[in-house]
Amino acid sequence: MATNAGSTADTSDDEWNRNWCYAAMGLLWFFGTIFFFMVCCYFHRIRLVISIVEASARFINNNLCILLVPLVNTLFALCWVVVWIASLIYLYSVGTVSKNASGYPWSTVDWELYTEISWYTNLFWGLWVVAFFVSLNVFVIAAAAVIWYFQQGDGQEGGPKTTKNPCCTGYCWAMGWHLGSIAFGSFILAVVWAIQIIFLYIEKKMRDSGAAKNRCVEILFKYIHYCLACFERLIQFLNKQAYIQVALTGKSFCASAWAGFCVIMNHLVDFSLLALIGNGFMYLAVILICAGSAACAWCVMTYTDYFDESSSMWFPIVLVAIIGWMIGKLFASVYMVACYAILQCFYVDCEIQKGSNRPPRFTPSELKNFVERAKNA
């Protein structure tokens, strides 16, 4: 194409880039318009979810010891894992010992049928106990949030209503009345873990034999692992809602799981928004805690002389960042369980207030307007 200066220039690439920019801008405007209308349509629900997050923050602030629940349960779980591994090693060594022909440094042990059954039973038993401690975390936090929600009242927004610690009460409920429900829910989770381990073992055997080198087989196993991982997250989410219902109603696990499923289906938008907004805040909190911890470690090692003899400053900084990430994930897990528990308490509170002429008394201050609106709807 000729220009005024008499030179030639190819503008086809510029025209192609310009058209793509127009198309991308059009898509951005399209999705932005949809997002704007969705915010307008669900404005009240978004305000409710934000109030749930605020109430959960005040719950944790009033009961800081709730952050110790995962640490205490993890400590007991680690003690159990040590004993469990020792018992697995002992059972593995029971049998006729012979030299390993494959060249591995350990010997081959020929088991009797009873020993083999005992070893695999003990393996599943260990998974079950670990899942039990995971479920116990969720139940104690959920029970503490339920107790705190209905402890609110006139002048009680500043702190707990009674001197009883909700965390201790949650442990008492778990060990005294709902141990079977927690055990049954953790059994389901342990079964899912066992299935995942079985498929990992099958894949390893097929890799050793060379059958898994086929591209189709490899893709099939990846698809199976992906589906099992999604199913595991689904079970954990449903178990979480079931434990909240157990703490709320005192019913058995199956009845509570069905009630929790019905609550999710009836308020699917609210749960979706809470998962989106709550997890968004939690990811941001984890990043800030991790980055802030690393920045503090860098400042201490750079501007003080306490670590002048260190050969490198990056290993301690990375270690501090990892610890900060773990603390952030711990806080996020507690926070999200509290959010879901307070959301279900809100629905129960709305049902209690229906037909009542009195203002909501035991509702947290962040949610009183929403309960009033639901009561008058």
Image (cartoon, rainbow, N blue to C red):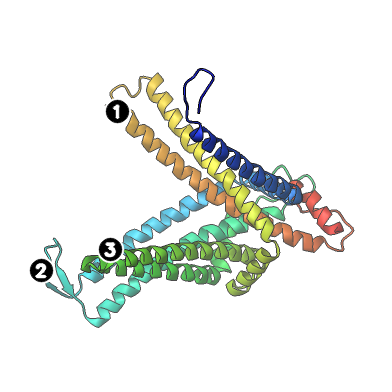
Labels 1 and 2 touching (C-beta < 8 A)? no
Does residue 162 sit above or below 184 in this rendering?
A: above
Left or right position of 194 against 93: right
Tell us which disc is closer to us: 3 or 2.
Answer: 2
Residue 188: percent from left, percent from top? 48, 71
Labels 3 and 2 touching (C-beta < 8 A)? no
Disc 1/disc 3 C-alpha distance (Å):
38 Å
**Residue depicted at x 63% and y 56%:** 272
**Residue depicted at x 51% and y 52%:** 69
The residue lying furthest to the right in this view is 357
Mark drawn on residue 312: 1
Mark 3 or mark 2, earlier in chain: 3
- Amino acid type at image mark 2: Ala
Mark 1 or mark 3, earlier in chain: 3
The residue lying toward the viewer, choosing from 272 and 75, is: 272
Quadrant in the rendering for residue 250:
bottom right
Left or right position of 114 against 187: left
Mark 1 or mark 2, earlier in chain: 2
The residue lying furthest to the bottom in this view is 113
Disc 1/disc 2 C-alpha distance (Å):
45 Å
Residue under label 2:
101
Residue under label 3:
86
